[in-house]
Image: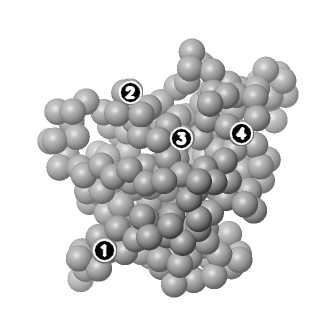
Amino acid sequence: MDTKRRDIGEHSCFPPISSGEAIILLLGSFPGEMSLAQGRYYAHPRNAFWPIIGALLGFEPSEPYSVRIERLKKNRIALWDVLSSCRRKGSLDTSIDRESMLINDFDRFFNIHQRIRYVMFNGRRAEIEFRRHALTIESIRERNLELHSLPSTSPAMARLTLDQKIAQWRCISTILSASPPPK
């Protein structure tokens, strides 16, 4: 572990979780402190990501992490973050030092994952930084990507109940049911 980087609050994100069959990419902004400490996406127990995804895909959010990851892959969902690294004190997106942000290599990612047609943003910060820095409008059109805003699953986004968040995230189920897996 590079303690020097930790001391100044600079962190790096996780590699993407994906398979060659993915048609949906779920993007967060950057992992929170608990996720970074555990090396797992959405590790904070009050983050609603796994309860929402479990409700949509029909599994218990308490299943082992490796099983949840396989459920995502099986359902053709990739998971990643917009930022590859940044400096931040705490876990809030509002605490990210804008000057320190580095964006993940989305051109490379989409060249490898050519079946992805839907990019879903877990919260406003992920969408803002993706639209601002990740791909040009022309590239989004060329790749035939549909971009969808979703309410953040963060416990800091408390103005919506879990049921209200599930209702808004249900578009994922609709996309999956309208796009049968290849034979």
Label 4 environment density (alpha carbons within 10 Å; few <14, some 14–19, many ≥20)? some
Label 1 environment density (alpha carbons within 10 Å; few <14, some 14–19, many ≥20)? few
Give the SS element for disc 1: helix
Residue at numbered disc 2: 133
Give the SS element for disc 2: helix
Q: How many marks?
A: 4
Residue 146 visible in this rendered orientation of the protein: yes
Residue 33 percent location from the top left of the image: 75, 43
User: Which residue sits furthest top?
Assistant: 99
Residue 67 percent location from the top left of the image: 62, 76
33 or 65: which is nearer to us?
33
Give the SS element for disc 4: loop
**Sequence-wise, which precedes: disc 3 or disc 2?**
3
Residue at numbered disc 4: 91
Q: Is residue 1 left or right of residue 100?
A: right
Q: Is residue 71 left or right of residue 38?
A: left
Label 2 environment density (alpha carbons within 10 Å; few <14, some 14–19, many ≥20)? some
| Residue type at the position of mark 3 | Ser
Residue at numbered disc 1: 174
**Alpha carbon of mark 4 to alpha carbon of mark 2: how far?**
21 Å
Residue 45 percent location from the top left of the image: 75, 62
Residue at numbered disc 3: 29
Give the SS element for disc 3: loop
Q: From the image, which quarter does the N terminus lie in? A: top right
**Alpha carbon of mark 3 to alpha carbon of mark 4: how far?**
11 Å
| Residue type at the position of mark 2 | His
Q: Is residue 151 above or below residue 33?
A: below
Q: Is residue 158 left or right of residue 116?
A: right
